[in-house]
Image: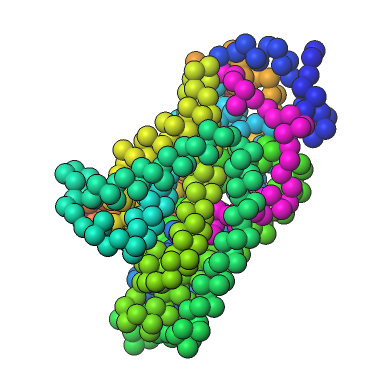
Amino acid sequence: MPTDPGLAHNAPDVEFDLEQIRHSHLYNADLAPVTQAQRKWGVLSFTALWVSMSACIPTYMLASGLIGSGMNWSQAVLTIFLGNVIVVIPMILNAHAGTRYGIPFPVFCRASFGTTGANIPALLRALVACGWFGIQTWIGGDAIYKILGVFAPSTTTGSALPLLGITTLHFACFLFFWGINMWVIWRGIDTIRVLLNFKAPLLVALGLLLLWWAWRAAGGFGPILSQPSAFDPGQPKAGQFWSVFVPSLTGMIGFWATLSLNIPDFSRYAKSQRDQVVGQAIGLPATMALYSFIGVAVTSATTIIYKETLWNPIDVITRFKNPAVLVLALFALCLATLATNIAANVVSPANDFAQLAPKRVTFRIGGLITGLIGIAMMPWKLLADPSGYIFTWLVGYSALLGPIGGIMIADYFVYRRRRLHVHNLYLADGEYHYSGGFSWVAIAALLAGALPSLPGFLVNVNAIDATHVAPLFLSLYSYAWFVGFGVAFVVYLVLRHLAPRS
């Protein structure tokens, strides 16, 4: 049987009939297992991936919602760090199959959900990514708009467009930055890797430089770092810490719960398992904690320097009047946002949309679909409420992504003991066809994992009144990712052993 030489180095037991899968409707070049020549990502590449994605404006602003809910700065940063220590575990586990077999996320899902059923987790992941793509694109466009306003204040005046709620120039800046994202997508995965490697050290250096400026200009870091926790004895929310900490921790896990699923899209390019494990463990938790601390410290200093609290770094930068500083800052912010956006929010949905129709949708077309949906979601409205951003957006979608992660890990590590038959992942009538292309076991486990959090989510979005929901279900929503992951993990294994072919 002819085999793909690109996989033999990584797992001697992996082999498949390349000609057989090439003609399958489930195959295209972007979803195919990668070859030896494509495996260029080492420890530094994976560390750079996470430093690049974590060093961004949403991370900078992440602690603001936690401090607004009553935490002091150290509690907020510790919550962010702990959430990322937890989420890096399923990240590393799901990355294993990508590195061993060279397959992307939607193809990996076929083993547990079926060759057609894999469209369900792929679409759920893709739609969340479209929302994130829109948010990051809006942030980049907003940076361009606000700095244009410094050079030409008259350009930022004008009435808001109907339905959109923003001015014509604001929307034009958003579309301009959107176009830059689309250009990078068209260039392909190697351009993305180079972009990440360049951005990582630059953004860490600029973040530390901003921290030094704030400390020097304010003569310290100001009142936010000296502000007591609202949960301390005698404070307004005394004794309520855990009721805020748990949903906040879930929200922090939700921040990267998306990547914990589709990490095979990147780990398939790893030189070895060690490279992806060490690179991710080094790159993610520490960078998230450092950049969120920079956000808290600089924001605290702005209270002294400008007599108002500025959580958005774009608002801080527009206070600088030196044109060279403004141009450099604009470049850095746009580069930071661009690299994070492409890596975190385009690579996966581009592959996910390709999963729907592999012979018609390529990586590039999938990226374009992502971009168009990102515009349609009007991301400036998602960011309008910081509390809703954490407790509705982040926690809400973690209730869906947690069960998917539980199913994938249960199937690969426990049920299959890390063995996949690669060629069957690309055959409509192969081992992973199940019942009409769907694994009803996985679908049942997904529903079982997501349903406990549904009542709490409906209360959070004001669809039903809290008095109509038992307190237990309101509490479960605070643990949405944990509950979904655990329930789906157990239910999947039980049902899979009862009905292995279902």
Q: As rendered, which of 271 and 147 lies closer to the eye?
A: 147
Residue 43 falls inside the magenta stretch: yes
Q: Quadrant of residue 205?
A: bottom right
Give the image location of residue 108, x and y in percent.
Answer: 60, 31
Quadrant for residue 88, please give it. bottom right
| Residue at horizontal 48 percent and vertical 79 percent from the top | 214
The image quadrant of residue 315 is bottom left
- The residue shown at (62%, 22%) is 29
Query: Residue at image x 38%, y 82%?
Result: 305
In the foreground, 373 or 62:
373
Q: Above or below — where is 446 with respect to 299?
A: above
Q: Is residue 334 in view from this perspective?
A: yes
Q: Is residue 336 left or right of residue 34?
A: left
Along the line of sight, the residue nearer the viewer: 480 or 277: 277
Q: In this image, 213 relative to 223: left or right? A: right
Q: Is 232 in front, or is 30?
A: 30
* Relative to 21, 446 lies left or right: left
Residue 17 vs residue 168: left or right? right
Does residue 429 show up magenta in the picture? no
Question: Which colour assignment does the render follow?
Answer: rainbow
Q: Residue at x 23, y 50 (%)?
A: 167
Find residue 5 and report its horizontal and vertical position in percent. Answer: 80, 24
How many marks are shown on the rendered structure? 0
Chain part drawn in magenta: 26-55
User: Taking the image as drawn, is residue 241 in sight?
Assistant: no
In this rendering, the answer to whether 16 lies above or below 296 is above
The image shows residue 257 at horizontal and vertical percentages of 50, 49
Quadrant of the image for the N terminus? top right
Looking at the image, residue 155 lies above or below residue 362: below
Residue 379, position as x, y percentages in the image: 33, 47
Give the vertical position of 27 relative to 174 (above or below).
Answer: above
